[in-house]
Image: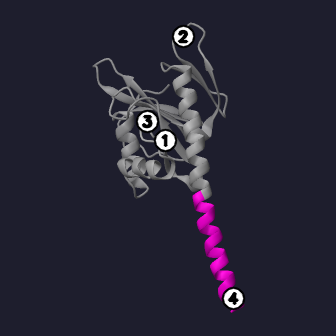
Amino acid sequence: MKKSVDFSYEVTPLTMALLSKTNDEGLVQTVVLEESQHYFVSPPPTKVMDKACEYYGQSLQGLQKGTKNVSNITHKAPIAIDSRSGMYFFPTASPSKKTCSWLSHTHITNIFPIHNGSGTEVIFNNEHRIAVNISFGSIQNQMHRTAQFRFYLDNRIQRIKDAVILKETTRIEL
């Protein structure tokens, strides 16, 4: 793990997780896990996530409202920063809590309960493993809710594409 980096970080399709970590001074920082590198950034994960949403022309609050509209998920709502590039993330706790971390649904291949009941092991596509202090049931629920949200959103987008294609085909035939 690299030392703290004091710069603005942008979430990308390579981002696997934004993990909450309290430093020696008691300040909450973010451990950024990417496919090939890991480092610390100063702001807490939800602030990093909010900035990422803004970078893509949205707001975290707006994406959460959009999730509610698409799937009726209201608490610990997963978000699609950019569905085209597979940037779907879910929070491990209420985003208003400093302990909230964000995990990329796209990068997770499996989860397992830690045998002593102290949390969940998360395994990513690149075989990197982390232990999170969240119950297996909670992570499993967040994984399922995010999959459900992705399914509903993908279907909505496909229906719009199909309607546009049908409209264009109808125009050509006239």
- N-terminal of the pair, mark 3 or mark 2, is 3
Q: Which residue, given by chain and number where applicable, does mark 4 sit on? A: 172
Q: Measured along the vertical axis of the image, is residue 116 above or below residue 166?
A: above
Residue type (three-letter) at the residue carrying disc 1: Pro
Q: Say what secondary structure mark 2 lies in.
A: loop
Q: Nearer the viewer, residue 3 or 139?
A: 139
Instruction: Work out which residue is located at the far right of the displayed protein and give it.
Output: 173
Q: Is residue 53 above or below residue 4?
A: below
**Percent x, y of residue 9:** 41, 43
Residue type at mark 4? Ile
The first of marks 1 and 4 along the sequence is 1
> Taking 57 as reference, is 71 left or right?
right
- Residue under the point 42% across and 41% down: 74
The answer to whether mark 1 and mark 3 are in CB contact below 8 A is yes
From the viewer's perspective, is 95 left or right of 155? left
Q: Mark 1: few, some, or many residues within 10 Å (few <14, many ≥20)?
A: many
Q: Residues within 10 Å of mark 4 (few under 14, many from 20)?
A: few
How many residues crowd mark 2 within 10 Å: few (<14), some (14–19), many (20+)? few
Badge 4 marks a residue whose secondary structure is: helix
Query: Could you tell whether 89 is left or right of 36 in the image?
Result: left
N-terminal-most mark, 2 or 1: 1
- Front position in the image: 70 or 36: 70
Whichever of labels 2 and 4 marks the residue nearer the N terminus, that label is 2
Magenta part of the chain: 156-174
- The residue tagged 2 is 117
**Residue that mark 1 sits on:** 78
Q: Is residue 102 magenta?
A: no
Identify the amino acid type marked 3. Lys
Cα–Cα span, label 2 and label 4:
62 Å
Residues packed near mark 3 inside 10 Å, few (<14), some (14 to 19) or many (20 plus) = some
Q: Which residue is mark 3?
A: 76
